[in-house]
Amino acid sequence: MRVLVVDDDFMVARVHSAYVARIPGCAVVGVAHTGADALRLAAELRPDLVLLDVYLPDVSGLEVLRLLRTGSADDPFVLMITAADDSVTVTGALHGGAAHYLVKPFDAAVLAQHVERIGRVRGRLAGLDRAGQDDIDTVFGARPGVATRLPKGLTSTTARLVEKVLRDADGDLSASECAERTELSRVSARRYLEHFVETGAAVVRLRYGGTGRPERRYRWGS
């Protein structure tokens, strides 16, 4: 995906650009520090995704969001990235059509997770002529849980069990910890966990430490 980064803070914009550059399949095509520059670059560069701050020196990021969302299928997806955590601003972003909303600060893994999900949604839409309900639920972030169609080999009863364990967890869980609490094999637990991540019902982060591969940690919700 071609990404436009918009933030009034030059250093923050640089950090977020570096985060994006580490995401496979993504490239930063422009950086803007004002609303006017954001709109100009969006028109010139036609990015697939805009990372948009709310606090800009000339105009609110919510106004930029409104102007970016013309109703065309070619409009970029917009991921709000801001320190604003008040409900009025969050509601404004939701009503304005933002794909998601991240409150600063966050690390590279969190940003990558949300950008990759937007990429999956974008790819799914691009490959459709007509959308089925499963496609629509995925695109709009609906989380009907086990009511959605499960991949072959997964059952609704076990999915509900894994969902409950993940919801009730105090923090995130590894596949091994989930397996222990559900009395499933680690392989089976991970299949359900990855299904929830794929559908947007759960999120995963990587925990680095020691040698070997990083550990995947799962948490219910976006």
Image (cartoon, rainbow, N blue to C red):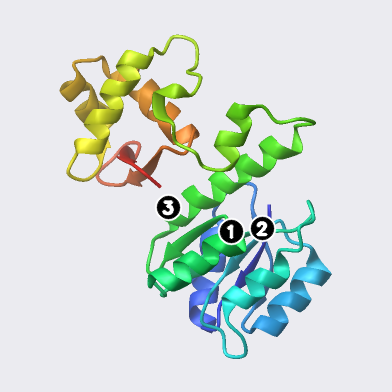
Q: Is residue 11 left or right of residue 157?
A: right
Give the camera-side residue of 176 and 163: 163
Name which residue lies at 58% across and 74% down. 62
Q: Give the Cα separation between the discs numbered 1 and 3.
A: 12 Å
The amino acid marked with disc number 3 is Ala
Q: Which mark is residue 60?
A: none
Locate residue 216, reporting x and y percent. Answer: 34, 37
Residue bearing mark 1: 21
The amino acid marked with disc number 2 is Ala
Badge 1 or badge 3: first in the primary sequence: 1
Above or below: residue 127 compared with residue 31: above
Q: Quadrant of residue 97?
A: bottom right
Q: Quadrant of residue 182?
A: top left
Residue bearing mark 3: 109
Badge 1 or badge 2: first in the primary sequence: 1
The amino acid marked with disc number 1 is Ala
Which class describes the residues within 10 Å of circle 2: few (<14), some (14-19), or many (20+)? some
> Which residue is at the far top?
153
Residue bearing mark 2: 27
Locate residue 186, reporting x and y percent. Answer: 28, 19
Q: Quadrant of residue 110?
A: bottom left
Q: Is residue 49 left or right of residue 111?
A: right
Locate residue 210, reporting x and y percent. Answer: 24, 44
Badge 2 or badge 3: first in the primary sequence: 2
Label 1 close to label 2 by CB (< 8 Å): yes
Badge 1 marks a residue whose secondary structure is helix
Badge 2 marks a residue whose secondary structure is strand
